[in-house]
Image: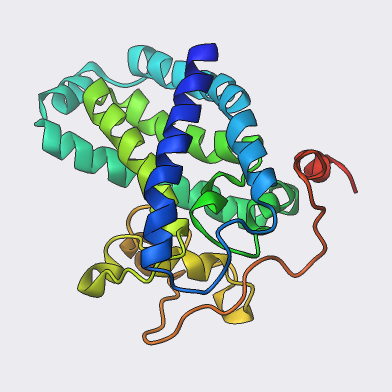
Protein backbone atom coordinates (compact mmCIF):
# COMPACT_ATOMS: atom_id res chain seq x y z
CA UNK A 1 0.00 0.00 0.00
CA UNK A 2 2.80 2.42 0.92
CA UNK A 3 4.53 1.66 -2.38
CA UNK A 4 1.32 2.44 -4.30
CA UNK A 5 0.92 5.71 -2.41
CA UNK A 6 4.49 6.75 -3.20
CA UNK A 7 4.04 5.83 -6.86
CA UNK A 8 0.87 7.92 -6.98
CA UNK A 9 2.68 10.82 -5.35
CA UNK A 10 5.52 10.62 -7.88
CA UNK A 11 3.10 10.57 -10.80
CA UNK A 12 1.24 13.55 -9.30
CA UNK A 13 4.49 15.51 -9.02
CA UNK A 14 5.38 14.61 -12.61
CA UNK A 15 1.95 15.79 -13.76
CA UNK A 16 2.56 19.07 -11.92
CA UNK A 17 5.90 19.53 -13.68
CA UNK A 18 4.34 18.84 -17.08
CA UNK A 19 0.97 20.57 -16.95
CA UNK A 20 1.78 23.75 -15.06
CA UNK A 21 4.01 25.12 -17.86
CA UNK A 22 1.73 23.68 -20.57
CA UNK A 23 -1.27 25.54 -19.12
CA UNK A 24 0.82 28.69 -18.82
CA UNK A 25 1.90 28.56 -22.47
CA UNK A 26 -1.38 27.40 -24.00
CA UNK A 27 -3.96 28.78 -21.55
CA UNK A 28 -7.54 28.81 -22.82
CA UNK A 29 -8.96 30.93 -19.98
CA UNK A 30 -7.10 33.47 -17.89
CA UNK A 31 -7.12 32.03 -14.38
CA UNK A 32 -4.61 31.66 -11.59
CA UNK A 33 -2.48 28.54 -11.37
CA UNK A 34 -2.69 28.66 -7.57
CA UNK A 35 -6.47 28.88 -7.54
CA UNK A 36 -9.23 28.42 -5.00
CA UNK A 37 -9.67 24.80 -3.99
CA UNK A 38 -6.16 23.72 -4.93
CA UNK A 39 -5.45 22.37 -1.43
CA UNK A 40 -8.65 20.33 -1.61
CA UNK A 41 -7.52 18.83 -4.92
CA UNK A 42 -4.11 17.97 -3.48
CA UNK A 43 -5.83 16.29 -0.53
CA UNK A 44 -7.88 14.14 -2.93
CA UNK A 45 -4.70 13.29 -4.86
CA UNK A 46 -2.94 12.12 -1.70
CA UNK A 47 -5.90 10.38 -0.05
CA UNK A 48 -7.60 8.56 -2.92
CA UNK A 49 -4.74 6.18 -3.69
CA UNK A 50 -5.46 3.77 -0.83
CA UNK A 51 -9.27 3.46 -0.85
CA UNK A 52 -9.40 3.36 -4.65
CA UNK A 53 -6.71 0.66 -4.84
CA UNK A 54 -8.54 -1.38 -2.19
CA UNK A 55 -11.91 -0.98 -3.92
CA UNK A 56 -10.53 -1.86 -7.35
CA UNK A 57 -9.04 -5.07 -5.94
CA UNK A 58 -12.60 -6.38 -5.62
CA UNK A 59 -13.36 -5.69 -9.29
CA UNK A 60 -9.95 -6.98 -10.36
CA UNK A 61 -10.40 -10.25 -8.46
CA UNK A 62 -13.95 -10.62 -9.78
CA UNK A 63 -12.78 -10.10 -13.36
CA UNK A 64 -9.96 -12.64 -13.02
CA UNK A 65 -12.29 -15.20 -11.42
CA UNK A 66 -14.82 -14.64 -14.20
CA UNK A 67 -12.11 -15.36 -16.78
CA UNK A 68 -11.48 -18.73 -15.07
CA UNK A 69 -15.03 -19.81 -14.27
CA UNK A 70 -17.37 -18.05 -16.71
CA UNK A 71 -15.66 -16.99 -19.94
CA UNK A 72 -15.50 -19.92 -22.42
CA UNK A 73 -11.98 -21.21 -23.09
CA UNK A 74 -12.23 -20.62 -26.89
CA UNK A 75 -12.99 -16.93 -26.22
CA UNK A 76 -9.98 -16.61 -23.91
CA UNK A 77 -7.76 -18.30 -26.47
CA UNK A 78 -9.07 -16.05 -29.26
CA UNK A 79 -8.28 -12.94 -27.21
CA UNK A 80 -4.80 -14.22 -26.27
CA UNK A 81 -3.97 -14.84 -29.93
CA UNK A 82 -4.78 -11.25 -30.96
CA UNK A 83 -1.77 -9.02 -31.66
CA UNK A 84 -0.84 -6.53 -28.95
CA UNK A 85 -1.97 -3.44 -30.92
CA UNK A 86 -5.41 -4.92 -31.54
CA UNK A 87 -5.78 -5.99 -27.92
CA UNK A 88 -4.91 -2.44 -26.88
CA UNK A 89 -7.54 -0.90 -29.18
CA UNK A 90 -10.18 -3.33 -27.92
CA UNK A 91 -9.25 -2.68 -24.29
CA UNK A 92 -9.65 1.06 -24.85
CA UNK A 93 -13.01 0.58 -26.57
CA UNK A 94 -14.48 -1.91 -24.07
CA UNK A 95 -13.20 0.08 -21.07
CA UNK A 96 -14.65 3.28 -22.48
CA UNK A 97 -18.02 1.62 -23.00
CA UNK A 98 -17.93 0.72 -19.31
CA UNK A 99 -16.97 4.28 -18.42
CA UNK A 100 -19.71 5.70 -20.64
CA UNK A 101 -22.57 3.73 -19.07
CA UNK A 102 -21.30 3.96 -15.49
CA UNK A 103 -20.72 7.69 -15.99
CA UNK A 104 -24.21 8.09 -17.42
CA UNK A 105 -25.64 6.25 -14.41
CA UNK A 106 -23.80 8.64 -12.09
CA UNK A 107 -25.66 11.51 -13.75
CA UNK A 108 -29.02 9.71 -13.87
CA UNK A 109 -29.64 8.32 -10.38
CA UNK A 110 -29.82 10.83 -7.49
CA UNK A 111 -27.89 8.69 -5.00
CA UNK A 112 -25.06 8.21 -7.47
CA UNK A 113 -25.16 11.84 -8.52
CA UNK A 114 -24.44 12.95 -4.96
CA UNK A 115 -21.16 11.03 -5.22
CA UNK A 116 -20.33 12.34 -8.70
CA UNK A 117 -21.34 15.92 -7.90
CA UNK A 118 -18.14 16.19 -5.86
CA UNK A 119 -16.18 16.03 -9.13
CA UNK A 120 -18.46 18.54 -10.85
CA UNK A 121 -18.20 21.04 -8.00
CA UNK A 122 -14.95 22.40 -9.48
CA UNK A 123 -15.56 25.89 -10.87
CA UNK A 124 -12.03 26.72 -12.07
CA UNK A 125 -11.35 23.84 -14.42
CA UNK A 126 -7.73 22.82 -14.99
CA UNK A 127 -5.56 19.69 -15.07
CA UNK A 128 -5.71 19.22 -11.30
CA UNK A 129 -9.51 18.97 -11.41
CA UNK A 130 -8.98 15.44 -12.73
CA UNK A 131 -8.15 14.25 -9.20
CA UNK A 132 -11.02 16.15 -7.54
CA UNK A 133 -13.15 13.02 -7.25
CA UNK A 134 -14.79 11.10 -4.47
CA UNK A 135 -13.06 7.70 -4.07
CA UNK A 136 -16.40 5.89 -4.54
CA UNK A 137 -16.78 7.69 -7.86
CA UNK A 138 -13.41 6.41 -9.06
CA UNK A 139 -14.00 2.87 -7.80
CA UNK A 140 -17.39 2.69 -9.52
CA UNK A 141 -16.29 3.93 -12.95
CA UNK A 142 -12.85 2.32 -13.06
CA UNK A 143 -14.13 -0.97 -11.66
CA UNK A 144 -16.90 -1.29 -14.24
CA UNK A 145 -14.51 -0.32 -17.04
CA UNK A 146 -11.87 -2.89 -16.02
CA UNK A 147 -14.12 -5.86 -15.28
CA UNK A 148 -14.93 -6.85 -18.91
CA UNK A 149 -11.34 -6.62 -20.15
CA UNK A 150 -10.18 -8.77 -17.23
CA UNK A 151 -12.99 -11.27 -17.69
CA UNK A 152 -12.15 -11.64 -21.39
CA UNK A 153 -8.51 -12.36 -20.62
CA UNK A 154 -6.73 -9.48 -22.31
CA UNK A 155 -2.98 -9.42 -21.69
CA UNK A 156 -1.40 -7.61 -18.76
CA UNK A 157 0.65 -5.57 -21.24
CA UNK A 158 -2.45 -4.26 -23.03
CA UNK A 159 -4.28 -3.48 -19.78
CA UNK A 160 -1.19 -1.87 -18.25
CA UNK A 161 -0.67 0.34 -21.28
CA UNK A 162 -4.32 1.35 -21.20
CA UNK A 163 -4.11 2.33 -17.52
CA UNK A 164 -0.99 4.43 -18.12
CA UNK A 165 -2.42 6.28 -21.14
CA UNK A 166 -5.80 6.76 -19.44
CA UNK A 167 -4.08 8.33 -16.42
CA UNK A 168 -2.44 11.06 -18.53
CA UNK A 169 -5.41 11.47 -20.83
CA UNK A 170 -7.58 12.39 -17.82
CA UNK A 171 -5.23 15.26 -16.92
CA UNK A 172 -5.21 16.49 -20.52
CA UNK A 173 -9.00 16.34 -20.84
CA UNK A 174 -9.41 18.62 -17.80
CA UNK A 175 -6.49 20.92 -18.59
CA UNK A 176 -7.02 24.63 -19.23
CA UNK A 177 -5.48 24.52 -22.70
CA UNK A 178 -6.55 25.72 -26.14
CA UNK A 179 -5.25 22.60 -27.89
CA UNK A 180 -7.47 21.79 -30.87
CA UNK A 181 -7.91 18.21 -32.08
CA UNK A 182 -9.24 19.39 -35.47
CA UNK A 183 -11.05 16.65 -37.43
CA UNK A 184 -10.26 14.16 -34.65
CA UNK A 185 -12.56 16.06 -32.25
CA UNK A 186 -15.39 13.61 -33.05
CA UNK A 187 -13.13 10.58 -32.63
CA UNK A 188 -10.95 11.23 -29.57
CA UNK A 189 -11.94 12.95 -26.33
CA UNK A 190 -10.29 16.38 -26.21
CA UNK A 191 -10.17 19.13 -23.58
CA UNK A 192 -12.88 20.92 -25.58
CA UNK A 193 -15.10 17.80 -25.43
CA UNK A 194 -14.69 17.25 -21.69
CA UNK A 195 -14.95 20.92 -20.75
CA UNK A 196 -18.47 20.92 -22.19
CA UNK A 197 -19.24 17.98 -19.90
CA UNK A 198 -18.26 20.11 -16.90
CA UNK A 199 -20.19 23.15 -18.10
CA UNK A 200 -23.00 24.43 -15.90
CA UNK A 201 -24.85 25.74 -18.96
CA UNK A 202 -28.21 24.05 -19.52
CA UNK A 203 -27.54 22.99 -23.11
CA UNK A 204 -24.46 21.00 -22.04
CA UNK A 205 -26.00 19.27 -19.06
CA UNK A 206 -25.65 15.46 -19.02
CA UNK A 207 -23.57 15.29 -22.20
CA UNK A 208 -20.18 13.93 -23.29
CA UNK A 209 -19.80 10.94 -20.97
CA UNK A 210 -16.99 9.09 -22.77
CA UNK A 211 -13.42 9.28 -21.47
CA UNK A 212 -11.48 8.30 -24.60
CA UNK A 213 -13.62 7.97 -27.73
CA UNK A 214 -15.95 10.88 -28.51
CA UNK A 215 -17.81 8.87 -31.14
CA UNK A 216 -19.38 6.75 -28.38
CA UNK A 217 -21.41 9.79 -27.33
CA UNK A 218 -22.24 10.42 -30.98
CA UNK A 219 -23.59 6.87 -31.33
CA UNK A 220 -25.73 7.08 -28.17
CA UNK A 221 -27.02 10.60 -28.81
CA UNK A 222 -25.29 12.42 -25.95
CA UNK A 223 -22.67 14.39 -27.88
CA UNK A 224 -22.48 18.18 -27.41
CA UNK A 225 -19.61 19.76 -29.33
CA UNK A 226 -20.71 23.01 -31.02
CA UNK A 227 -18.19 24.53 -33.41
CA UNK A 228 -16.68 27.91 -32.65
CA UNK A 229 -17.95 28.04 -29.05
CA UNK A 230 -16.50 27.27 -25.66
CA UNK A 231 -18.20 26.72 -22.29
CA UNK A 232 -18.25 29.86 -20.15
CA UNK A 233 -19.02 28.53 -16.66
CA UNK A 234 -18.42 25.34 -14.71
CA UNK A 235 -19.79 23.71 -11.57
CA UNK A 236 -23.22 22.54 -10.44
CA UNK A 237 -26.47 24.43 -9.96
CA UNK A 238 -26.93 23.51 -6.30
CA UNK A 239 -24.86 24.38 -3.21
CA UNK A 240 -21.80 22.24 -2.53
CA UNK A 241 -19.59 22.29 0.57
CA UNK A 242 -15.98 23.38 0.42
CA UNK A 243 -13.02 21.52 1.82
CA UNK A 244 -11.84 17.94 1.49
CA UNK A 245 -13.52 16.40 4.53
CA UNK A 246 -16.88 18.05 3.86
CA UNK A 247 -16.85 16.85 0.27
CA UNK A 248 -15.88 13.36 1.39
CA UNK A 249 -18.96 13.01 3.62
CA UNK A 250 -21.29 15.03 1.36
CA UNK A 251 -22.87 12.01 -0.42
CA UNK A 252 -23.98 10.54 2.91
CA UNK A 253 -25.47 13.66 4.54
CA UNK A 254 -28.75 15.26 3.57
Direction from residue 223 to residue 57 in the image, left or right: right
* In the image, residue 63 above or below residue 208: above
- In this orientation, which residue lies closer to the viewer: 240 or 107? 240
Residue 53 found in image quarter: top right
- In this orientation, which residue lies closer to the viewer: 183 or 89? 183
Which residue appears at 80% of the width and 52% of the height? 242
Which residue appears at 56% of the width and 27% of the height? 49
Q: Is residue 204 visible?
A: yes
* In the image, residue 149 above or below residue 131: above
Direction from residue 99 to residue 49 in the image, left or right: right
Quadrant in which the N terminus is drawn = top right
* In the image, residue 14 above or below residue 230: above
- In this orientation, which residue lies closer to the viewer: 72 or 239? 239
- In this orientation, which residue lies closer to the viewer: 176 or 71? 176
* In the image, residue 12 above or below residue 160: below
Which residue appears at 46% of the width and 36% of the height? 13
Residue 44 x/y as whole percent: 64, 38
Direction from residue 77 to residue 48 in the image, left or right: right
Amino acid sequence: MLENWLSGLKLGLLAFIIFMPVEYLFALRQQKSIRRGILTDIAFLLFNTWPVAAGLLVFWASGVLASFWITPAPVLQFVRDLPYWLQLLLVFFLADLGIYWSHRALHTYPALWRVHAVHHSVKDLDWLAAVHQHPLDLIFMKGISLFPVLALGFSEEAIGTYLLVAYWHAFLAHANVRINFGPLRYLVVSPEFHHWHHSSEREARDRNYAAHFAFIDLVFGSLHLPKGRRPQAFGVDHPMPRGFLRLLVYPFIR
